[in-house]
Amino acid sequence: MRTLKTRLKIRDVPSPHQRSRRAKEVDLIVVHHITCPPGCFGTGDIEELFLGRLDCSKHPAYRDVEGKELSAHFLIDRRGKITQFVDTDRTAYHAGKSSWRGRGRCNDYSVGIELEGDERHIFTGRQYHNLARLCRDLMRAYPAITPNRIVGHSDIAPERKTDPGPRFDWKRFRGLLRSGK
């Protein structure tokens, strides 16, 4: 299994529901945000959902994802801390259809990065900084990823998604990505 060589402290939290990418090379990073107020991750059903351990009898609104392999690959919280939920050589279920440049099933070849926050809250400097560092590390590990293959949820599922949303500053992020800081 490939190990991402990174300077970042990453806590691996494996999902009980995951499968191999079947040798498909990762060539896409999808940046999005978790739709809950800052600081709410890890305080209830949201974390259960991302870990694939959601008890849908207690959370009927999520009945359609019961038993699915639903998880982000990485989460960057408001402090900049990074948690990896699914190893980059694994794939997880993604609710709904997604495609990139005519290819479907984006989770088979993409790595997702969630930013804690929502469209009402500006992302923190630490989030931008560590997002750029994480993306550079992923680009080194997977040479098929280039800057123009770092996209938003809105690019792979525009009929359903608008994230990372208008509060995400792509210009600032790409500047950090180029600067190497």
Image (cartoon, rainbow, N blue to C red):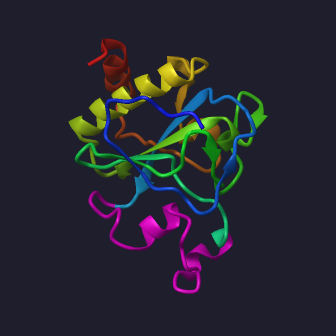
Q: Nearer the viewer, residue 9 or 147?
A: 9
Q: Nearer the viewer, residue 23 or 164?
A: 23
Name the residue: 65% across, 68% down.
Answer: 65
In the image, residue 33 sits, relative to residue 176, either above or below, namely below
Q: Nearer the viewer, residue 136 or 156?
A: 136
Residue 81 is left or right of residue 114, and the answer is left
The magenta-colored residue range is 37-64
Q: Quadrant of residue 56?
A: bottom right
Percent coordinates x, y for residue 159 in the rendering: 65, 46
Q: Quadrant of residue 166?
A: top left
Residue 64 in sight in this render: yes
Name the residue: 63% across, 30% down.
Answer: 26
Residue extending farthest top: 179
The answer to whether residue 158 is magenta is no
Residue 158 in sight in this render: no
**Principal SS element in the magenta part?**
loop
Residue 103 is left or right of residue 47, and the answer is right
